[in-house]
């Protein structure tokens, strides 16, 4: 039995090889160097985020230098079994890492000298700025492959070289190479700009918080709690995967890591309960992807969104909670349907009661309580994360295995290791964001998307979904969100805001201040705004407003809070759609990782995960067409409750099964019910009738299912 288990483990490791970065072992001398660099760097970041008063540009440069060194030592330039080549690779990696630190120190030491020369580059300015960009490209190549470096090179060369040879809307007169290097390296807009600041503040502190939670034993408690809470139900292992992956993902922020850590437990349990192997892997992949939608970390998305929208982090995570719950419920509905269809049986997973499990690990929840409490009381997210890290250590002393000095050092080192590749990714993507800002190509792209969509919000969302899928084949989801948000968020926001404006015009509720803008454009049309009008007339009237006046018109028509929620809705749509590359073939690493554990065909598993993760496409429609974000508490709960029934109906329509098999008419009726509950129409009676009809079909299918042989 032991030999068989070892063979299985080796087979799993072989299949997972390539999904994880090829890294130097932690027990080697290099690994120990990485360990202590990680400890020192984590403490340095805690200082900068709590007590430090250094320039943000300087801290970003140090952030780059330190993590580039760690990345260079962690991920070798090439992998070889030859000892001489390994030594040569280590020497090259150390040279690259220390060059990154020198580039950071040069910026700190010689920035003032540059401005004293009137921003005229000296010889060493050329050398170090070019070297810093090269290192960022190389680290991006090592950690994510060739796509991001190629994308950055295309963007940078567009600015000073080939952009001037393009005709049409994408033509760009060009900037000098000196200007490009200055804005990429010395200014607070390039690789050490906004994205880098988000990296060393919010992202690092919460990744460090997650590392401390895992080291304290909170990860095991989450899995045990999930297994005990859901394991005894029919199809319980499937619900364990959904619940456990959601809870783990809420602090880990990595869908592949989430899949590998929880999938080795949940996928065999689902197989044992009677679920098909491919479905088991698909559920784990879909649930792990949802971990990036679950507050508080949201795969760094919440922090980037807060920076882009200027909406507080606390508001964003509180708004994101119900949509994330909808997603996990949709995955749970697939589990329930498949459990009934496959006659999956209950599996005794944990003999302890839920109360016993909770009693043994309730203290692991204290840091989360501290975090949320500090955020509610108005402390910054970075400060709240710092205090929460201390609370993790304190709460661990209530357990049987309190964190000692060595455990604290291990957590600091692991947090830095977890952050290294993410930091280099974000800093590298900052170069692309800078090019978009310098050239104005973001506005051009937004206008192009609007033109292609013909003013249709639905077509715009479809175009964004296609763009996110294409970008996701080469970019991690966080990078794909940053690029897409920079390019398409203005277009999406404009269409959504104008849709709300048209609703006001149709109802005759346009404020007087907004009518004066129409008065300046066409005096004869103002009288039409005093009374309700048709949607066609409203659109025709809006079309006469020049683009330069649209922003002012929106500001006069709607309060700032409403516009802020519309902007957040646009970013939330893009963020959700950017997750689809995790589970959508042909490149879906999360599904591939689950397939390796379940020993199923990777591509077929990807399509199964894609089907199960349909909430990624449905919930964003609620953001676009309803008040799910920014509505009153009553509106939000009403949308949520009806959406729950709508998603269950949609799953039944797709699967042709609820508690029992459905005939063609029942299946079609479920499709109609799903549309009635998920698509906005404003008729409460229709929604209530749809819910009652769904309940009737559900009860009938249960009766049919009870008569079917097991």
Image (cartoon, grey):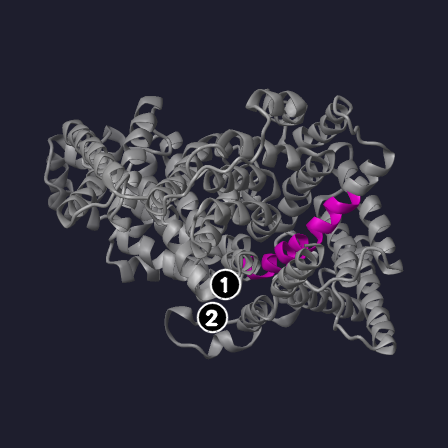
Quadrant of the drawing holding the C terminus: top left
Q: Which residue is mark 1?
A: 439
Does the stretch in magenta take in 415? yes
Residue under label 2, please give it: 172
What stretch of residues is rendered in magenta? 412-433
Using residue 126 as the reference point, say whether residue 554 is left or right of it. Answer: left
Q: State the image coordinates of residue 292 (x, y, percent, origin top left).
A: 52, 44
Q: Are marks 2 and 1 in contact (CB under 8 Å)?
A: yes
Residue 175 image position (x, y, % from top left): 57, 69
State left or right for residue 172 relative to residue 647: right
Secondary-structure class at tag 1:
helix
**Is 44 placed above or below 628 here?**
below
Q: Is residue 258 magenta?
A: no
Q: Residue at x 61, y 48 (%)?
A: 194
User: Would residue 643 be found to the left or right of residue 582 on screen?
Assistant: left
Q: What secondary structure is marked by label 2?
A: loop
Q: Would residue 467 appear left or right of 241 to someone viewing this image?
A: left
Name which of mark 2 and mark 1 comes first in the sequence. 2
User: With respect to residue 640, does 658 lie above or below?
Assistant: below
Residue 129 in view of the camera: yes
Residue 378 place in picture, x, y as percent: 59, 23
In depth, the one of 349 and 480 nearer the eye is 349
């Amino acid at each position: 039995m032991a030999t068989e288990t070892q063979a299985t483990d080796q087979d799993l490791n072989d299949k997972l090889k390539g999904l994880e970065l090829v890294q130097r072992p932690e027990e080697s001398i290099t690994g120990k160097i990485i360990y202590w660099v990680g400890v020192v760097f984590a403490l340095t970041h805690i200082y900068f985020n709590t007590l430090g008063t250094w320039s943000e540009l300087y801290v970003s440069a140090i952030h780059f230098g330190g993590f580039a060194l760690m990345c260079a030592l962690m991920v070798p330039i090439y992998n070889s079994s030859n000892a001489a080549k390994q030594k040569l690779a280590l020497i090259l990696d150390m040279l690259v890492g220390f060059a990154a630190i020198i580039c950071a120190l040069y910026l700190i030491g010689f920035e003032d000298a540059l401005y004293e020369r009137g921003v005229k580059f000296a010889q060493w300015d050329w050398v170090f700025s070019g070297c810093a960009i090269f290192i960022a490209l190389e680290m991006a190549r090592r950690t994510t492959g060739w796509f991001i470096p190629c994308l950055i090179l295309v963007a940078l060369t567009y600015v000073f070289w080939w952009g001037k040879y393009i005709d049409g809307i994408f033509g760009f007169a060009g900037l000098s190479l000196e200007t490009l290097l200055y804005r990429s390296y010395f200014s607070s807009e390039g690789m050490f700009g906004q994205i880098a600041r988000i990296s060393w503040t919010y992202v690092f502190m919460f990744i460090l918080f997650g590392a401390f939670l895992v080291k304290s034993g909170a990860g095991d408690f989450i899995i045990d709690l999930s297994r005990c809470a859901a394991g005894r139900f029919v199809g319980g292992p499937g619900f364990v995967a959904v619940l456990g992956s959601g809870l783990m993902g809420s602090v880990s922020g990595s869908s592949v890591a989430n899949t590998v850590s929880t999938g080795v437990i949940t996928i065999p349990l689902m197989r044992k309960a009677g679920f098909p192997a491919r479905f088991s892997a698909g559920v784990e992949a879909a649930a792990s992807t949802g971990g990036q939608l679950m507050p508080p970390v949201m795969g760094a998305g919440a922090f980037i969104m807060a920076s882009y929208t200027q909406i507080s982090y606390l508001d964003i995570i509180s708004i994101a909670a119900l949509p994330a719950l909808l997603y996990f419920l949709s995955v749970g509905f697939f589990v329930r349907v498949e459990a009934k269809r496959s006659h999956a049986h209950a599996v005794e997973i944990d003999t302890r009661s839920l109360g016993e499990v909770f009693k043994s690990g309730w203290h692991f929840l204290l840091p989360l309580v501290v975090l949320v409490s500090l955020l509610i009381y108005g402390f910054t997210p970075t400060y709240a994360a710092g205090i929460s890290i201390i609370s993790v250590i304190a709460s661990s002393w209530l357990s049987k295995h309190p964190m000692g000095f060595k455990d604290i050092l291990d957590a600091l080192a692991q947090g830095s290791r977890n952050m290294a590749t993410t930091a280099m990714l974000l800093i590298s993507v900052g170069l692309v964001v800078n090019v978009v800002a310098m050239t104005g190509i973001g506005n051009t792209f937004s206008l192009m998307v609007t033109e292609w969509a013909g003013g249709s919000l639905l077509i715009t969302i479809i175009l964004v979904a296609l763009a996110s899928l294409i970008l996701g084949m080469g970019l991690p989801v966080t990078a794909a969100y940053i690029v897409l948000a920079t390019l398409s968020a203005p277009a999406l926001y404009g269409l959504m805001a104008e849709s709300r404006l048209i609703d006001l015009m149709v109802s005759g509720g346009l404020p007087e201040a907004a009518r004066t803008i129409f008065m300046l454009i066409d005096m004869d049309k103002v009288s039409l705004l005093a009374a309700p009008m048709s949607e066609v007339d409203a659109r025709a009237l809006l079309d006469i407003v020049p683009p330069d006046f649209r922003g002012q018109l929106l500001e006069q028509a709607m309060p700032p809070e409403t516009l802020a929620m519309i902007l957040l809705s646009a970013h939330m749509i893009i963020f959700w759609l950017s997750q689809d590359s995790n589970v959508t073939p042909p490149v879906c690493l999360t599904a591939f990782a689950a397939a390796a554990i379940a020993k199923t065909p990777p591509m077929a598993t990807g399509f199964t995960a894609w089907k199960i993760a349909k909430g990624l496409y449905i919930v964003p429609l609620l953001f676009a067409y309803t008040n799910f974000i920014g509505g009153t508490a009553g509106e939000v709960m009403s949308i949520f409750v009806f959406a729950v029934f709508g998603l269950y109906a949609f799953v039944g329509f797709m699967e042709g099964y609820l508690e029992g098999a459905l005939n063609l008419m029942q299946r079609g009726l479920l499709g109609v019910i799903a549309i009635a509950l998920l698509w906005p129409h404003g008729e409460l009676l229709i929604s209530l009738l749809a819910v009652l009809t769904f309940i009737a079909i559900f009860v009938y299918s249960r009766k049919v299912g009870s008569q079917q042989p097991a």
